[in-house]
Amino acid sequence: MEELWLFCEVCDEENNHEVLKSRTSAKKGFSFQGVVKCLECQTTSSKEVNEEPPISLKLRISIDNETVNDTLTVDRGVLIEVGQTRPHPDGLILITGIEMPHKRLDQVYSQENPIVWAKKATHSKIRFAVHDGEETHSYKEEFEIDVEFNKGMKVKLEDNLARVIGITMHGGKSVSNAFAFEIARVTCKFIAENSQSRFHRRNA
């Protein structure tokens, strides 16, 4: 099943969509025309996507007392901010500075070609979407980057216990297990009250 990570007007957020019918091209960037179905709300809609090739920004990663020169690949129009975490082939990085000619900024759009300063991140914020009947609740929780998530596992979100039913990585790929730094979103369902009570008694 081919899937794309697209904005859903019904859910009012980006979700995985199943491609039902499509025409694509990758000659210059990526273009898509077709019919898709949102895997969260099951709404079918027509979509057209035209993406320019990604940009390679100069990246300076601070490791202990050294600075390593690298590149950061991002799409055009992406807002780069100090304090933001972004995926990198060597693991999650935390942006610590943004450099433009003769000035430092707190944020800038990628097409302005800044030099990005960063360090390896130790924690990652994960977005959780928890289904509760016809309602969906959103949470954001911080985990160490090497914490592993699996479909079927239990997670505690504030005072509620939920079971993981879906894991979406940065870029939109759905997987059965992944580490925290790889994950953009985790979909869950609340566990029934009696199950939650048994869980608390078992761990009391």
Image: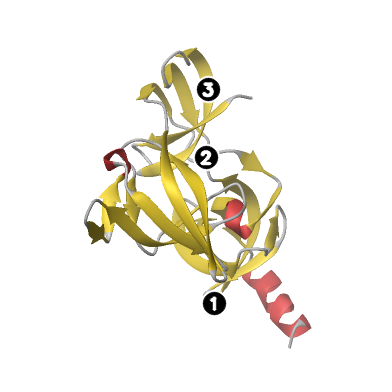
Q: Nearer the viewer, mark 1 or mark 3?
A: 3
* Label 2 – label 3 distance at C-alpha: 16 Å
Q: Amino acid at mark 1?
A: Asp
Where's residue 64, x and y in %? 57, 71
Q: Nearer the viewer, mark 2 or mark 1?
A: 2
Residue bearing mark 2: 171
From the viewer's perspective, tell me whether residue 122 is left or right of residue 12.
right
Label 3 CA crowd tier, 10 Å (few <14, some 14–19, many 20+): some
Where's residue 170, x and y in %? 53, 45
Residue bearing mark 3: 19
Which SS class for mark 2?
Answer: loop
Q: Nearer the viewer, mark 2 or mark 3?
A: 2
Which numbered dot is residue 45?
none
Q: Amino acid at mark 3?
A: Val
For the point 60% across and 51% down, the residue is: 182
Where's residue 193, x and y in %? 62, 71
- In terms of sequence position, does the residue under pointer 1 or pointer 3 come before the other? 3
For the point 41% across and 58% down, the residue is: 117
Which numbered dot is residue 159?
1
User: The N terminus lies in which quarter of the figure?
Assistant: top right
Q: Amino acid at mark 2?
A: Gly
Which SS class for mark 3?
Answer: strand
- In terms of sequence position, does the residue under pointer 2 or pointer 3 come before the other? 3
Which SS class for mark 1?
Answer: loop
Relative to 32, does residue 182 appear above or below in the rendering? below
For the point 49% across and 14% down, the residue is: 22
Farthest-out residue, bottom: 204
